[in-house]
Image (cartoon, rainbow, N blue to C red):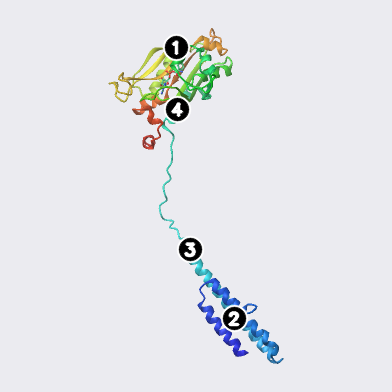
Amino acid sequence: MKDQLQAIEKEALEQIAQIETLKDLQDVQVTYLGKKGSITGVLRGMGKLSPEERPVIGEMANKVRESIQTNLAEKKEAIELKELEIQLEAEKIDVTLPGRPVRVGGTHILHSIIEEIEDHFIGLGYEVKEGPEVETDYYNFEALNLPKGHPARDMQDSFYITNELLLRTHTSPVQARTMNALDGEPIRMICPGKVYRRDSDDATHSHQFTQIEGLYVDKNVRMSDLKGTLDLFAKKMFGTDREIRLRPSFFPFTEPSVEMDISCKVCSGEGCSVCKKTGWIEILGAGMVHPKVLEMAGYDPKVYTGFAFGMGPDRIAMLKYGVDDIRRFYTNDVRFLQQFHEA
Ligand code: FA5
């Protein structure tokens, strides 16, 4: 039996030395140490031994078992270490490789222009207000002295949702909304936002564009205050060397009414498709708030006067940066939009 045990140990250790996978290790373990394994087989036969031989063979069998167990454990550790090394090698990352650049977006140029205009007017003590883009017929027209059937409604054809609801055609309804909410108190506010018209798209017209409304109501507000405010704004936006002109105009909600033009930067006043060969581009409408509009909003026109203006930031951006077509702001060509972030 001694010889048998020695042979088992020799054979087992030789096999363990050749094992390369955990699966083979498991098989060898079962072959020698399992319930039906070689060592167990030897121990079972111990009953046939004499009482003197039994402890000697028992001790030897235990030593052989321990030896096999130790060798298996060492082999297991070695295989696991090797597998870990292979895995680490396969999953190796080069931390010194340069990263993939993340494309960073930026503020749309129209948004930047609106913020610049807001900053200017906030500096003059104006508050920034907001109003709904889906507007009622009352605020978009009636509260601005444009009753149903008024011919001036044709100047601003809209997209209607119902007979009484439409996409606002200008930011002027926010004038009426602000006056109604403030109930007779002095006002100095601007309101930027999107507006919509059934205009045919061309180089200077878009069916969706932006406007900034301005409203100043107090005692003793005069036309000269409006002129000074617009003049200061034009100088701030376009520089002192660009010419401006005010033309008499008509809006049912202001009296008198004006329109302000800026000399065309694209052609330096010579005439091009942007200025329709006139050398000028209209950027805003303005005037003294009509007494009827004040009255409808609860202000006594004998005590209060005011001026209002509505400007088009799209056209202002075109003039400031020499953009030849308003549609470029809305067609999302990244090459066009990116240039405003490179400076
Ligand atoms: C109005 O919308 C008036 N609500 C402005 C106003 C406010 C007058 C307060 C008096 C008092 P108008 O339709 O002219 O006015 O438009 C004002 C500005 O919006 C224009 O000067 C122009 O810069 C811009 N604009 C008008 N239509 C378009 C369009 N289709 N595409 C791009 N910009 C436009």
Mark 3 or mark 2, earlier in chain: 2
Rounded to the nearest whole Å, what is the CA distance between mark 1 and mark 4?
25 Å
Q: Quadrant of the C terminus?
A: top left
Q: Secondary structure at mark 1?
A: helix
Q: Earlier in the sequence, mark 1 or mark 2?
A: 2
Label 4: how many residues lie within 10 Å, few (<14), some (14-19) or many (20+)?
many
Residue linked to disc 1: 223
Q: Which mark is residue 67?
A: 2
Residue 330: which numbered mark, if any? none
Front label number (3 vs 4): 3
Give the number of the mark in front: 3 or 1.
Answer: 3
Q: Secondary structure at mark 2?
A: helix
On the image, the x and y values in percent for residue 30 come to 60, 76
Which mark's residue is nearer the viewer, 2 or 4? 2
**Distance CA(mark 2)–CA(mark 4):** 84 Å
Label 2 with label 4: CB-CB less than 8 Å: no
Q: Which residue is mark 4?
A: 114
Sequence order check, earlier mark of 1 and 4: 4
Q: Residues within 10 Å of mark 1 (few under 14, many from 20)?
A: some
The residue type indicated by label 3 comes to: Leu
Q: Amino acid at mark 4?
A: Ile
Q: Residue at x 42, y 43 (%)?
A: 103
